[in-house]
Amino acid sequence: MDNLTHNIRVLQKAFPNRFLCPMVKANAYGHGDVKLALHLEKLGIQQLGVCLIEEGLLLRKSGVNVEILVFRGFDEVGAKAIIDNNMTAVVSTWEQIEALEKVANKKVSVHVKFDTGMNRLGFRVEEAQKVFDRLNGHAKIEVKALCTHLYIGENAQEMDQTSAHQLQKLNKISEVFKSMNVFCHALNSSGILNLMEMEKKGSQDKSHPLYMQNWGLRPGLMIYGYSSLGHPDVAGLKPVMNLKSVVNNFRQVKAGETVSYGAKWTAQRDSVIAVISIGYGDGYHRLLSNKSSVLFDGKSVPVVGTVCMDYLMVDVTDVVQGRALETFKNTEVVLFGADQKGHVLSADELAHKAHTISYEMLTSVGERVPRVYVGKETP
């Protein structure tokens, strides 16, 4: 919780007067949405973003009072749930406007999403005037903000790249809605970190699209402590999650014997194999079989054999050599994060070996893995 607080304070200090909507969808990127949402509320966060209506309902039932933006689509039933639970719809289609019109019994505020190049959700750029005409002076719907989604946010510093073009388009759309006094939010973690890098360099180029407006911020990955830019970030972010397990038992394996399903690993020597109580059923990817490592007693040891649903095996021969195995009973094993001795195994490193991204490593951590919260819960 201390690291989460640190990451949020970095943002609040860098951008004190901007719309700031941390994303807590997908169980807060695997960290536990209720606990983190309540903590973020204590930190002064006034908006939170979710994907599903059900995610927002869970937060409301758990005592979260701040504004909740729902980014995925909805029908009439969903529209009523959003309104009845005082959440804010991010409107992306004409059908969603119609759903709100049919069920709203009071004036509701919405954010309107435009597709500036992602080709996933949102009204098309050329529909801006039509959307404005439909919602201007509407009896039931009030537009509070416009938004879009950067699809290559990593290039946001470049003047003639996709992010710059997207921001230019949204800026132009905002001129159509100027009489509504709306604001715009567009910067994801990549966009935010690029802006912070420009600020650190002392950029004076106020013609740059990142400076066209005080773009609102929707940080996701970065509040959980990881940079999405592929290099060390300027924010000094601190990872929030450590994924840990313990040794279930040890197996003495003779040279030539195999380990786990499919006999994909064969001992080249007499070996000591530690069976660890975690597997792909908990979110540790089977793709990491015979590719990754874990931290065991402060040392990096290889995962051997096929990762099972409930277990994985690691070769600890070199670490335990000459020592009684009883002394390693219930030894803590770090799948990613930091161990008690300060050694670090990054989720980025694990993701690289699984040919994926840290987002997936974090969000894959399953529901049956208990979340244990440490640090100050009251800022």
Image: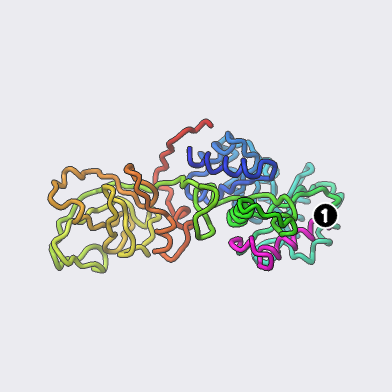
Q: Residue at x 79, y 64 (%)?
A: 127
Identify whether 238 is placed above or below 271. Answer: above
Residue 87 magenta-drawn? no
Q: Residue at x 15, y 68 (%)?
A: 256
Look at the magenta stretch and give its main secondary structure. helix
Q: Mark 1 points at which residue?
A: 177
Residue 103 in view, yes or no:
no
> Left or right: 132 with respect to 187?
right
The residue lying furthest to the top in this view is: 378
Q: Give the x, y percent position of residue 133.
A: 86, 57
> Left or right: 212 with respect to 364?
right
- Residue 87 location, quadrant: top right
Out of 11 and 290, give the one closest to the viewer. Answer: 11
Q: Give the x, y percent position of residue 291.
A: 33, 64
Q: Which residue is drawn at 51% across and 47% down?
A: 236
Which span of residues is magenta-colored?
153-177
Q: Give the x, y percent position of residue 33.
A: 52, 44
